[in-house]
Amino acid sequence: MNYQAIIEEIYTKVKNGENLGEVATYIPELGNVHPDRFGVHLTTIQNSHSFVGDSDVRFSIQSIAKVLILALAYKIEGAKIWERVGVEPSGSPFNSLIQLEYDFGIPRNPFINAGAIVICDILVSLLPNPKQMLLDFIREASNIPHIDYSQTIVESEKSMGFRNAALVNFLKSFGNIHNDIEVVLDFYYSICSIEMTCKELSKTFLFFANNGRNSFSKEPILTVSQTKRINAIMQTCGFYDEAGEFSYRVGLPGKSGVGGGIIAVHPNQYAIAVWSPKLNKKGNSYRGMKFLELFTTKTELSIF
């Protein structure tokens, strides 16, 4: 399969079409990103690369990092984490408080904000230096030593983080936050601030396409069973309340972020990252969704 030719063809088609939606201005720093940025990078489990556009420009991966903290918590703590967070699609906005009330403080899944905050709390309990140890985990998985947080984005997140502060306090009232809420929130904002290029993002997620094994060192990162389960949660919960639409149109496990990034994984084949900052009404990249739909249609490769 000539991935490079296919990616270039679809990229040109999408770039010449409409670029609808809005950049996520509710996090002030994200509003400064040029709305016409657009990049794609695909990495196969054989470590071959196909790319186009702004694939080497760093951007804030935002909620895509929720998959990585889940992987680290699951690796260390095992199935015990599911006592504090569920695995069901939410069907509600990613920052909903109403659902927590109905579910007695157990977030519906680890990819909505409340669920990711609980995973952050688990890691704060487990690790002596969670911020550094998460970076170490990501750098080892990706074979990229310079991946880092953006303190500028952390401060921007904090300046408008009223809903997340409400969520962590609400979770604390149900006994589902065990640590100091300011420590947990700082870790949560930090993970959302991680910056990567499309190339770095696709390399980071490659182990989800490789049965949990690092494609560079060949060492296991997760078990096959853990990898299967996280891929399943990406399939059903990775796109807020548009997960069904993504599954229907694209047919791959994946995760989006309000920075405009999308990562998608084809088990046993590749990880593909797309970045375009303008978001649709559900908070997912407009061009990213369109590109991946056309890509899996053209290649006739999805998990279905």
Image: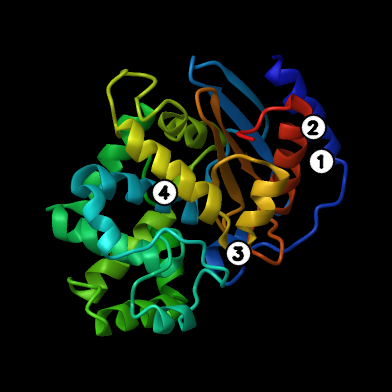
Quarter of image, res 206: top left
Upstream in sequence: badge 3 or badge 4? 4
CA–CA distance between discs 1 and 3? 24 Å
Residue, disc 1: 14
Upstream in sequence: badge 2 or badge 3? 2
User: Considering the numbered disc 1 on the image, is that residue within a helix, a strand or a loop?
Assistant: helix
Upstream in sequence: badge 1 or badge 4? 1
Upstream in sequence: badge 1 or badge 3? 1
Q: Nearer the viewer, mark 2 or mark 4?
A: 4
Q: Residue furthest left?
A: 128
Residue displayed at 85% across by 36% down: 13
CA–CA distance between discs 1 and 4? 27 Å
| Three-letter amino acid code of the residue under disc 1 | Val
Residue, disc 2: 10
User: Considering the numbered disc 2 on the image, is that residue within a helix, a strand or a loop?
Assistant: helix
Residue, disc 4: 67
| Three-letter amino acid code of the residue under disc 4 | Val
Residue displayed at 52% across by 56% down: 237
Q: Mark 4 and mark 1 in contact (Cβ < 8 Å)?
A: no
Residue, disc 3: 241
Q: Residues within 10 Å of mark 3 (few under 14, many from 20)?
A: many
Residue displayed at 41% across by 44% down: 230
Q: Mark 4 and mark 2 in contact (Cβ < 8 Å)?
A: no
Q: Nearer the viewer, mark 1 or mark 3?
A: 3
Q: Mark 4 and mark 3 in contact (Cβ < 8 Å)?
A: no
CA–CA distance between discs 2 and 1? 6 Å
CA–CA distance between discs 2 and 4? 27 Å
Q: Mark 1 and mark 2 in contact (Cβ < 8 Å)?
A: yes
- Closer-to-camera residue (29/183): 183
Side of 47 where 143 appears, left or right: left
User: Considering the numbered disc 4 on the image, is that residue within a helix, a strand or a loop?
Assistant: helix
